Image (tube, helix red, strand yellow):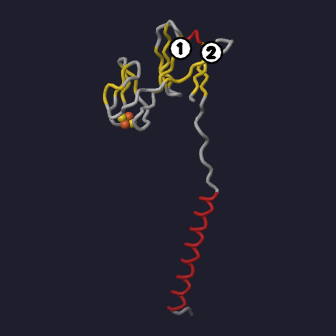
Amino acid sequence: MITRRDFLDLTTKALLWLSGLLGLGGLLRYLSYQPPPPPPRRYEIGAAAQYPPGSRTVLAEVPALLVRSESGFEAISMVCTHLGCTLEYKAEAFDCPCHGSRFDAQGRVTKGPAVEPLPRLRVEQGDDGALVVLKD
Ligand code: FES
């Protein structure tokens, strides 16, 4: 026959062990945490021939807008300079869905809260004609 006192004593000890095990599990999970790998700094975007002169192509994976002019290629970052949201490109302008900043087609700020223009990313062309966008 188990007394009320024994039952409460056993229950208390069981709950203490359980909370200790849960805490230990959380500690082990914390100690074994692996940070995610850094995002890539180099994006292969294919042959230059697929981007005709005068084209403006959104590269969603970068994210950037690839501009091909008569003088060559240029990539404008599509990461908002306010707090880092990804911009939307439409009607020759970049709009930020987070806080409403707006940039013109050259990446200059036309409406805040952002104050810095959009940075340019390096575009390199290999001997085989393939393009690579580099984030420095
Ligand atoms: S992150 Fe774009 S306006 Fe704030």
The spot of residue 103 in percent (x, y) is: 36, 24
Which comes before the other along the chain, label 1 or label 2?
1
Callout 1: helix, strand or loop? strand
| Quarter of the image that includes the C terminus | top right
Number of numbered discs visible in the structure rendering:
2
Q: Quadrant of residue 50?
A: top right
Displayed-image quarter of ligand 1: top left
Name the residue tied to disc 1.
73
Q: Position of residue 66 (x, y in %)?
A: 50, 18
Q: Quadrant of residue 20?
A: bottom right
Residue 93 screen position, x and y as percent:
36, 21
Ligand 1 has an atom within 8 Å of the beta carbon of the residue at disc 1: no
Residue at image location 54% in from the left, 77% down from the top: 15
Q: Which residue is mark 2?
A: 125
Please name whichever residue, 86 or 24, is drawn nearer the observer in this view of the structure. Answer: 86
Q: Amino acid at mark 2?
A: Gln
- The kind of residue on which mark 1 rests is Phe
